[in-house]
Amino acid sequence: MDPQIFNLGLSDDALSLYMILDHLHAFDMKATPEQFDDRWHKSKDEFDTATAELVMQRVVENDGHHLHLLPSSDWLAVKPD
């Protein structure tokens, strides 16, 4: 997990979703909707809002089937040192 994620001012839901995605990525699991069934305990609307927030900040890319984590150098609010 890249600690710079906490510098973006994301909502709690977006941070939670990032942590789930980071966990899936660490185990080379694809972030498909089925992967979130047992991991996301809020509504579909809250999931969609968190996803949109992460996409807007360029933390993730949504290809319509999977969510892909992007490197922190791509994130909008984080500037390289």
Image (cartoon, rainbow, N blue to C red):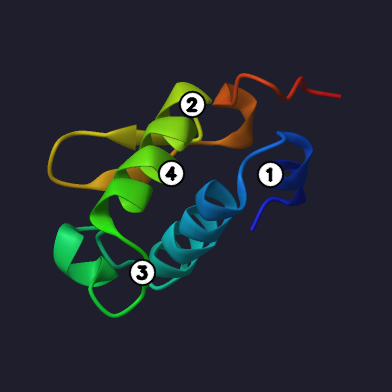
The residue at which mark 4 appears reads as: 50
| Other residues around mark 2 within 10 Å, as few (<14) / some (14–19) / many (≥20) | some
| Other residues around mark 1 within 10 Å, as few (<14) / some (14–19) / many (≥20) | some
The residue at which mark 1 appears reads as: 5
Relative to 5, residue 76 above or below: above
Quadrant (top left/top right/bottom left/bottom right) for the C terminus: top right
Q: CA distance from mark 3 to mark 4?
A: 11 Å
Q: Amino acid at mark 3?
A: Trp
Quadrant (top left/top right/bottom left/bottom right) for the N terminus: bottom right
The residue at which mark 3 appears reads as: 40
| Other residues around mark 4 within 10 Å, as few (<14) / some (14–19) / many (≥20) | many
Q: Amino acid at mark 4?
A: Ala
Ranked by sequence position, the earlier of labels 2 and 1 is 1
Q: CA distance from mark 3 to mark 1?
A: 19 Å
Q: Amino acid at mark 2?
A: Arg
Residue 64 picture location, percent across and down = 14, 37
Relative to 23, residue 15 above or below: above
Q: Amino acid at mark 1?
A: Ile
Q: CA distance from mark 4 to mark 1?
A: 14 Å
Residue 58 picture location, percent across and down = 48, 26
Residue 10 picture location, percent across and down = 64, 39
Numbered badge on residue 58: 2
Ranked by sequence position, the earlier of labels 4 and 2 is 4
Ranked by sequence position, the earlier of labels 3 and 1 is 1
Helix, strand or loop for disc 1: helix
Helix, strand or loop for disc 4: helix
Q: Nearer the viewer, mark 3 or mark 1?
A: 3
Q: Nearer the viewer, mark 4 or mark 2?
A: 4
Q: For this view, does 66 lie left or right of residue 16?
A: left
Ranked by sequence position, the earlier of labels 2 and 3 is 3
Relative to 40, residue 56 above or below: above
